[in-house]
Amino acid sequence: MQAKQAVVFSGAFAGAVLLLAAGPVWAHHAFYAEFDETKPITLRGTVTKWEMVNPHSWIHLDVKGPDGKVVNWMIEGGSPNALLRLGFTKDSLPPGTEIVVEGYQAKGGAIRAVGKDLTFTDGRRLFMGGSAPGAAPGETADGQAAPAKK
Amino acid sequence: MKRRFMVSTAAVIAVMLPGSALVIGQEAAKTAVAKSWTQPRTPDGQPDLQGIWSNVSSVPLERPKNLGAKEFYTPQEMAEIKARAAQKAPVDKAGTRADVHYDFNQFALDSSHTKVAPNLRTSLIIGPEGTVPPLLPEAQKRAADRAARNRGHQFDGPENRGLSERCIVWPNEAPPMIGGGYNGNVQIVQGPGYVGILQEMIHDMRVIPTDGRPHLPANIHQWLGDSRGHWEGNTLVVDTTNFTDQTAFRGSGDKLHVVERFTRTGDDSLMYEFTVSDPATWEKSWTAQVPWAKSDGPIFEYACQEGNYGMANILSQTRAEEKEAKEAAEAAARTGSK
């Protein structure tokens, strides 16, 4: 709860100054070294595992191809620490959840992708950021509470 | 909670309003807060800086060129900038390298999810120039040599990759400590003879003796340098030398010298100031000020090595691409020879 409150209370001020100027943002690694900008990809599948590990979280996703064959993809996402501050825990994305991932596939043809945008199948965003268009901190775009208040 | 934040915002703006740009800053803030606020002390009498602080800033290190010598926005200008910023979200063009990343907003990696101390500065670097001085020729050569050594070998092995990617040290950690856009939490703890500074990103604890002992011998180099602290009034002054030539802060070398000044300005505010010099890199030293805000915490463990799949992925995928290119070239050669 403490973390949630902090998010709400700072969002109004800090969100507004987000674009004031580019403050320093350190990235752990250059994503274009790992993923291919010429291979945008949309995956619809079922979560089999969520690794809340640093420096990046990874969602494992069973995706059925046009040939009916199921392939297990790994989707790279943001820092678990930041997700914890949004109120998410390792139990917040249970296996069996159906999601849609838009992103870019890994270089070299590996069955991995960066999850640029992650949504539930009804269009709600999976993780809700305070400055996401139309979303209050900790809420989905349609105003529902985040699924992860454990 | 919300009210406390607004009060502190108002206090800082009030401090900044009446004075000219020259007197605005740490000294003015100290004078102003002294009337209504008493510096707390630890049981052994040190000024008490302890707690978790956010060092995230929306202000860039260097001033945008079009602002010239303007050091501060007026509160009205700031309000207008904020209003404009709220209107649009950053969007990268699809199919570009910049777009190959997860959505910052969605993953709580932008400053809207972080407590950010109010700051009317146009750049963290103070003074009319507001920029890092130009690199001396020898520093330019050093940077060019370093890049040349790795050119064409960037993906050969882990040691060709950057320190961040290897989870060794991040740019926010080595003094000076400039928070990145996310998880920018710093915890200060104090005991007799020592100050400890834990940084959430990416894991390091700076243990700073304040007992007057000298620096390490000059031939010993450390990622975060070697820090020694002392108190000047209510200000903690930390002097750091003995850097490596590998962290290269804004082009610096192993002669980098950083002096940090930590001054608590209220229950929920602290002014962090640093002066950077390196005679082998810049003609003159430069100074920046970053207000920190008390953070609610907690600090979470950021075990960067824990699941650093990115490193293995980048290298193995490069090998796969090389193999693919080699096979394609061999196939083309076979076709061509027929």
Image (cartoon, coloured by chain):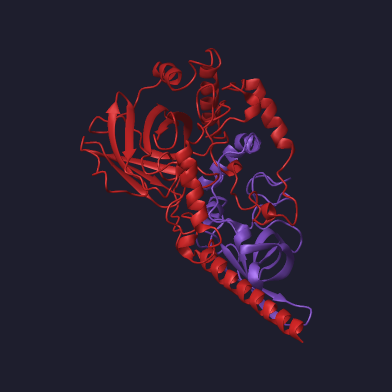
Chain colours: A purple, B red
At x 68%, y 29%, the residue is B81
Q: Answer yes or no: is residue A68 visible.
A: no
* Quadrant the C terminus of chain A occupies: bottom right
x, y (%) of residue B260?
38, 33
Q: Nearer the viewer, residue B142 or A97?
A: B142
Q: Nearer the viewer, residue B82 or B288?
A: B288
Q: Considering only vertical position in the picture, is B331 above or below B43?
A: below
Q: Where, by quadrant of the figure, is residue B258 drawn?
A: top left
Residue furthest to the front in view is: B337
x, y (%) of residue A104?
69, 63
Q: How many marks?
A: 0
Q: Where, by quadrant of the figure, is residue A95 drawn?
A: bottom right
At x 52%, y 54%, the residue is B148
At x 44%, y 49%, the residue is B200
Q: Answer yes or no: is residue A26 visible.
A: yes
Q: Nearer the viewer, residue B162 or B203?
A: B162
At x 74%, y 36%, the residue is B87
- Would you say A66 lies left or right of B285 here? right
Residue furthest to the right in view is: A66
x, y (%) of residue B276?
41, 33
Q: Considering only vertical position in the picture, is B113 above or below B265?
A: below
x, y (%) of residue B300?
45, 52
- Would you say B192 lies left or right of A27 here? left
